[in-house]
Amino acid sequence: MTGTELQLLGCAKTFAGDTKALLPTDLVVKPGEILGLLGPSGCGKTTMLRIMAGLETPDSGGKILFDDEDVTKVPIEHRSIGMVFQSYALFPNMSVQQNVGYGLKVRGISGSERDDRVNEVMSFCRLDGLADRAINQLSGGQRQRVALARAVAPRPRVLLLDEPLSALDAALRDTLRDELAVILRGLSMTAVFVTHDQSEAMAIADTIAVMRAGRIEQRAAPEVLYRDPQTDFVASFVGGANRLSGRFENGQLHLEGGTLKTGIEGQQPDHIFIRQEDIRITNPDGASLRGKVIGRVYLGTHTKLTISGVCEAPLMVTLQGADAPKIGDLVGLDIPANSLIHF
Amino acid sequence: MFVFLCFLPLLIFSLAFLALPLVRLVSASVGGEQGWLIYAEIVSNPRYMQSLLDTVLVSLAVTIAAVLIATTAALFLTHNRFPGRSVLIASLTFPLAFPGVVIGFLIILLGGRQGLVNTISSNIFDTRIVFAYSMIGLFFGYLYFSIPRVLLTVMATAEKLDPALVEAARSLGAAPLQVLRDVTLPGLAPALIASGAIAFATAMGAFGTAFTLATNIDVLPMVIYTEFTLSANIAMASALSVLLGLVTWALLMFARSLTGTSIAASG
């Protein structure tokens, strides 16, 4: 892989009024790796991105390294990063071509070299034929690609993206998410992006750092994060797993709606979760675990059910196909012991 | 019908307070013995033309200086928070409340024969510096009341500029002056044009300050006053007023068209 290795060493950020936006954090992003910073608002993910960019300085003691170079005190304009902003922040007084070429222009690259680089980047970001357009004549998706092209045209060492898809319509977001993933992978550039949407993080990132309250809860590849969460927050935030809380006795979990054989030997684990798609609906007669359907959302490829009376919080179940039970139906639930997530 | 009713107040207002007095003014200007030839007389009179030129020049100088000073101050005040900031902004906008006479008086206190500058320079350097009763005094007086007008407009716009635009330019490697030239000033352009136009028009028509400083100052509003009160030449006073209005309007239109095309060309 080509690219720059990005390292944060003991980076923390305390804002005025003693607000700890980021607790001391170590993080390594390998050359060419695409890292997603995932978490709810206020978890410190944007602060971390802005520290990488040089828009915020870490509290004293924190260090940022690009390969072996300490860039902690290097201001953003000399750090050689590319940044895509949430609002895209395209220059309204410049055409698409002028926007994309701006980073080259201020670096003093002119003439044919600049034109060639701009054309190359624009065609890579599928912006052919839009060179002379004004920014206000572009669609949301085009704006996003202009912002990306502008950020990568000067060949930055690290590409940073702040919620790159959140300014788009929901309908457009899925398509553009996949497109962005393809473009980013094609760039083979070290990239860090911030998102609060787990499906976005999973689609784009090589590894995801799930953040909460100023710290990284878990950093892993998407499938590891999904299959093997290390904290209860990761389990419920990534993929929306159901927490099963009840009385644990001899490998059995006694819930409000019945009893579940867990296959867990020895001590009671702190947390037991089950994924929405791992629950099967059965006939309520003779089922060891029962509940009542109180919500049903048909989504074409699958149906989402909300089932009450199983444990404290309503259980969320995702079923393939359309022949799901109706609201008010009593259902039996089959929860396979080997699908349980416990730690 | 309803739309017409909504339009009616504006129509009445425009007719009663804008169109009618203007028509009256024009008809008064040609009501004298020479009729329309009075305008030819103005153009051929070097004293009138010189005073028109002086008025335009001092107004232009005031506009440029006010926009430069107020924009710098507005950008500083928008981006920095410090104790006493709101007090400072309030005191910067204080001159808005002063009539021209008071501003003229302040200039005399500063640059008059017994003024602060002259007292200091006479005592220390043994040189007399008196500028209050000249175009320089007028320039400072106009500048004093133009700055708050520009400052408030530019600050309102600067606060609405997306800070991410500046951050984006910096992330692409732009130095502070490049950011100012390529991002901040284009973003402020509409406010600079609007407030510059107000500063210019106000300076063109300002009277109280010039009247207070008097003596060596021959700006057009002063000439109009002299024609009207001392010579009782109502036709000439009216004709000069029409001229003042037309020249101001034409220059503002010209400035607007210049900036309009340059903005369209860069966008």
Image: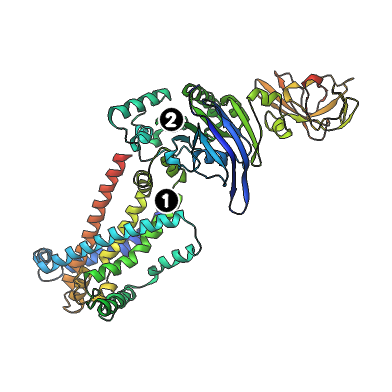
Element assignment for label 1:
helix
- According to the image, label 1 marks what residue? B3
Tell me which residue sits at (44%, 48%) in the image.
Answer: B161
Q: Percent from the top left, x then y, of residue B27?
A: 19, 66
Tell me which residue sits at (46%, 37%) in the image.
Answer: A88
Tell me which residue sits at (28%, 68%) in the image.
Answer: B140
Question: Position of B36 compared to A220: left or right?
Answer: left
Q: Nearer the viewer, residue A127 or A117?
A: A117
Q: Percent from the top left, x then y, of residue B49?
A: 13, 65
Residue type at mark 2 is: Val
Residue type at mark 1 is: Val
Q: Are the residues flagged by discs 2 and 1 from a single subunit? A: no
Image quadrant assignment for residue B129? bottom left
Residue A275 in sight in this render: yes
Query: Could you tell me which chain the residue with mark 2 belongs to?
Result: A
Say above or below: A39 vs B14. Answer: above
Question: Position of A255 compared to A230: left or right?
Answer: right
Give the position of the C terminus of chain B as an image quadrant: top left
> Which numbered disc covers residue A162?
none
Q: How many marks?
A: 2
Which residue is farthest front? A68
Residue B200 in sight in this render: no
Element assignment for label 2:
helix
Query: Could you tell me which chain the residue with mark 1 belongs to?
Result: B
Q: Nearer the viewer, residue A44 or B201?
A: A44
Image quadrant assignment for residue B72? bottom left
> Which numbered disc covers residue A152?
2
For marks 2 and 1, give the CA distance: 52 Å
Q: Percent from the top left, x then y, of residue B259?
A: 28, 48
Colour pattern of the rendering: rainbow
